[in-house]
Each structure stands twice: as structure tokens, then as C-alpha cells.
Amino acid sequence: MPRDNGDFFKGLRDEIAAKQLRRTVYIRMKLTFIIGLFGIGSLSIAGSPTKSLFYLITLVVLIFDLYIIGEDFTIKRAGMFLQCNPDVPQEERRWEKIVFSNRNPVGGVAALLSSMFVLIPAGIGLWNPKGNGMFYWAWVGASSFVIIGTWIYSHCLLTKLKKLRKDLNKEFPETTCYTEPS
């Protein structure tokens, strides 16, 4: 028995809502880990320095960034499908187009900016005025490289979304997907 389109679209909307919730949970967890690790890292427990936790902060932050970017991509991909599919009610397609054209411009870079703002204080906290070893500079370089790589990866996903939009325009020629102004 063929599945009803209404069931499919409801399932897709439920998936979008679940991904939005998961993305919010990842952002909240990221902030909690940052605050917790900075707090613990700034203490000296029983005379042993815990600043070395600062090295861990950027790793945790970047892992969360990848999860957040992945959830964001899935949400946008599903929204684009709803926007372009002629079987979706007209009002919902209009809403998806309005949402797409009025996206928060900071939202796409907020996670990566926050990672940069974590790397800088962590680097300052680990700074040794008597001199920094090779490990410190390797950590700064690797962390910066990974943040830049994550940013490039997020732009690759945006390119995939543009390709998906073109594919959906071919698949559903009777409806034109909204395209970004040039």
C-alpha cells in the first residue's frame, strides 16, 4: 500500500523538529562544557595545576561544532525539500521561502566564532611568560587549522545545499525553489 504524502511530510516535519531540538541541546552542552572546563582549568586542586584542561577545551568545542553544523545542514536540506515540492501545501512552501530569505546571517558562523573566542582565552590561560614549548605552539596551530577546516567544511555543506536546490528545481519544474539573490 503506497504511503500517503501527508504522512511523509508529517514525518519530515517531525524530523526537522527533532533535529532543531538536538542542535539546541548540542549548543547548550557545548556552552556547559566550556564553562565547566574553564572553571576547573583555572583552579589548582591539591597543588596540581589543572590548566592542561585548557588543551582539551578546543577539542571538545570543535567536536560539538561538527555535530551542530551537521544538524543544521539536515534541517536546511529538509526545509529546502519542503519548499520546492509541489505536493506540499502552498502556504507551507511560502513559509519555507520566507524563512530561507530571512535567515539569521550570524547563525551560520556563531558556532565557529564561539570556538575562536574559546581558543583565544585558552591560549592566554596556557601562556607561559618564561617561554612556551613546541607542544603549546603545535596546539595553537592545530586548533587554528581545525577551526579554519571546520569553517571550510561548513561552506562545502552550503555548496551542497545550492546543488540540491538546482537538483530540486529539475525534479520539480512546476515549482521554482527560491534562490538567493546574487
Image (cartoon, rainbow, N blue to C red):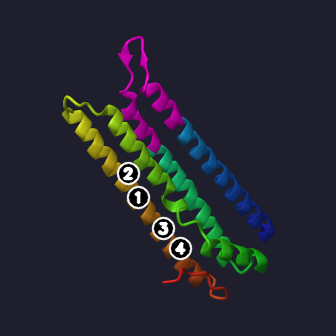
Q: CA distance from mark 3 to mark 2?
A: 17 Å
Say whether marks 4 and 2 touch (CB < 8 Å). no
Residue 43 lies, in percent from the top left, at: 44, 22
Q: Secondary structure at mark 2?
A: helix
Name the image quarter holding residue 71.
bottom right
The mark nearer the N terminus, 1 or 4, is: 1
The question of residue 52 being in magenta is answered with: yes
Q: Amino acid at mark 3?
A: Leu
Residue 76 lies, in percent from the top left, at: 59, 65
Residue shown at 46% from the left, 32% from the top: 38
Give the camera-side residue of 169 and 152.
152
Label 1 vs label 3, nearer the camera: 1
The mark nearer the N terminus, 3 or 2, is: 2
Label 1 vs label 4, nearer the camera: 1
Q: Secondary structure at mark 3?
A: helix
Q: CA distance from mark 3 to mark 4?
A: 10 Å
Q: Secondary structure at mark 1?
A: helix
Q: Secondary structure at mark 4?
A: helix
Give the camera-side residue of 122 and 57.
122
Residue corresponding to mark 1: 151
Mark drawn on residue 147: 2
Residue 89 appears in the rendering: no
Reply above or below: 31 against 19.
Answer: above
The mark nearer the N terminus, 1 or 3, is: 1
Crowd rating for badge 4 (residues with CA inside 10 Å; few <14, some 14–19, many 20+): some
